Image (cartoon, helix red, strand yellow):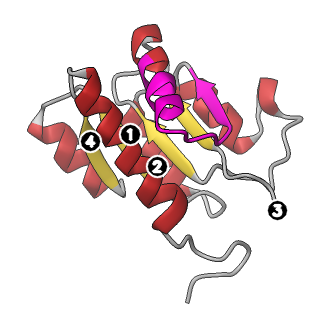
Amino acid sequence: MQQKSILLVEDNADDEALTLRALKKNNIQNRVVVAHDGAEALDYLFGTEARASRDQDVMPALILLDLKLPKVDGLEVLRRIRAHERTKLLPVVILTSSQEEQDILNGYSLGANSYIRKPVDFAQFTEAVRQLGLYWLLLNEPPPVGRPAL
């Protein structure tokens, strides 16, 4: 059985390092693929351009998605994930520093599974990441792969 992977979509190098450090601190050893902008995330998920050689049958178990991204913003990435048959059921957690109410509403309207504001304090952030990993990678029961929805 292949290990569940995480797709981290984050353009800020400090936030990327912080997230990876928090995952490691919580002993979450899942493979983490990092996309530094929305276009790179879509390339990874849909097998275009640089990621075309990736096994398209293997999808991440969890997508951690920032909203304020270059090239293609996080909400558009989410819109495209939900519009595609192969990715529409993937768990997507918006992990962002945005406190705009409209971002929260738009995220949930487009099908986000969760919306988490990045805590400024590292201890709080580490705890948030621990809970994310516990729930989405261990407790959550994903939909069966390859079965059409009723």
What residue is shown with label 2? Answer: 133
What residue is shown with label 4? Answer: 116
The dot on residue 129 is 1
- Amino acid found under the numbered disc labelled 3: Met
* Magenta residues, start to end: 18-35
Give the distance between the C-alpha atoms of the residues marked 2 and 4, in whole angstroms.
13 Å
Q: Earlier in the sequence, mark 3 or mark 1?
A: 3
Whether residue 61 sits left or right of residue 49 in the image: it is: left
- Other residues around mark 1 within 10 Å, as few (<14) / some (14–19) / many (≥20): many
Q: Residue furthest left?
A: 101
What residue is shown with label 3? Answer: 1
Q: Nearer the viewer, residue 86 or 32?
A: 32
Q: Earlier in the sequence, mark 1 or mark 4?
A: 4
The dot on residue 111 is none
Whether label 1 touches label 2, CB < 8 Å: yes
Q: Position of residue 93 (x, y in %)?
A: 39, 47
- Other residues around mark 4 within 10 Å, as few (<14) / some (14–19) / many (≥20): some
Give the distance between the C-alpha atoms of the residues marked 3 and 1, in whole angstroms.
24 Å
Q: Residue furthest top?
A: 13
The local secondary structure at tag 3 comes to: loop
